[in-house]
Amino acid sequence: MTVYFYRDRFVESGQSAVPIEERAYNYGDGIYELVRFDQGRPVGLDEHLERLETSAAAVRLRLPFPLAKIRAIVVEAASRVEAPVVDVYFQISRGEAPRVHAFPEAEPVLALFAKPGKTYTDEFRRAGVSVITVPDERWSNCYIKSLNLLPNVLAKQAAVEAGVYDAVFVRDGFVTEASASNVFGFHAGTFHTAPAERGILNGITRRFIIAAIRELGLPLCEERMSAKFFEQEVEGAFITSTTMDIMPVCAINGRVLPSLAENSPVWTVLNRMRELSRGAGLSVG
Ligand SMILES: Cc1ncc(COP(=O)(O)O)c(C=O)c1O
C-alpha cells in the first residue's frame, strides 16, 4: 500500500500524473529526502529536514511550504501507511514551466510517496553483502541530495551485472561512498570513513554511527580512505543508509572478508547506533 502526495494534496495512485514539462522530469532539477518511521517514530526527521533546507539553498530552490508544514505532511503520510516500518520519500522540484534551462517563473512542487519499508534480518546482515569498486563519475557537489542520480543508477546496475549487491565509488584513488549509502572500513581496531566534504552525502545514518562510535570510545579515523587500503587491507567494512542501517560487507572485488562475530566492534556499533537513532530527541547534527 502506497500513499501519494502531489503539489498540495494526497492523491490516489494514477491521479498523480506529472506534467511532461516538469523540471524534475526534464532536468532532474530538484532535491529529495527519504526518512524512515519505525513503529510510528521518525528516525532523524529533524536532520533530514535540515539537510533538505541545505540542499534547497545550495541549488537556490525555494521550498513550496514552510519546513513545519513539510514535516506535518511527511508525518501525516507515514501515519496513513499501516506497517511497522514506513519509508517516506519526498522531493521538491523547481516546478512546471516551458523547457528553458534558466530558472523559470514557476511554483516549486512537493511530491511524496510513503510505503512499507524493506527490512533485513540479522541473519542477512551476518552473511553480509558483496561490493565492487567503480570510478566515481559524479559531479563535485554530492553533499547536495539532488535528483540527478544517473551515475548512481549506472553504478548500481554495474554491481547487479557483476553479481554483487552494490558499487563503491572511487575518486582520485580514494573511496567516497556507495551508490546509495556511505562506506566505513574497519582495520586494526579503528573505524575509517570519508570526511563529510562536498564529494559525499553526509548521511544521517553515517552521523548516528559516528555518534555511536564516539560514545563507545572506539577509535575513528574520519579521513579519506585510499582505494588500495579499502580493497586490499580492511578487515571489515559496512555500508550505511536510512533503509539499511548498517549493512556489513562480506567481499570487496571478490576479496572475502572474515565474517563478523557477534561480539565484534562492528556489531557493538550496529546495536548502539540503532538504540541512538531510535532514542527521542537525539541530535547528531
Ligand atoms: C549517495 C548516497 N550516500 C549516502 C546515503 C545515505 O544517507 P542517509 O543515511 O541519510 O540515508 C544515501 C542515501 O540515499 C545516498 O544516496
Image (cartoon, rainbow, N blue to C red):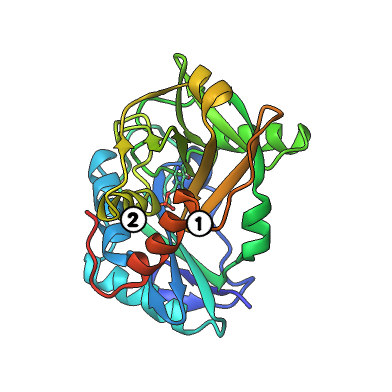
In this view of the protein, can residue 22 be seen by the observer?
no
Q: Nearer the viewer, residue 116 or 1?
A: 116
- Measured from the top left, where is residue 57 in percent x and y? 22, 44
The quarter of the picture where residue 212 lies is: bottom left
- Measured from the top left, where is residue 198 in percent x and y? 30, 31
- Measured from the top left, where is residue 47 in percent x and y? 28, 58
- Residue 170 is left or right of residue 165, and the answer is left
Name the residue carrying label 2: 208
Task: Determine crowd level at label 1: few under 14, some 14-19, many 20+ residues with C-alpha closer than 10 A.
Answer: few
Name the residue carrying label 1: 263
- Residue 47 is left or right of residue 200, and the answer is left
**Total marks placed:** 2
The quarter of the picture where residue 12 lies is: bottom right
Label 1 element class: loop
- Measured from the top left, where is residue 175 in percent x and y? 46, 26
Q: Nearer the viewer, residue 254 or 30?
A: 254
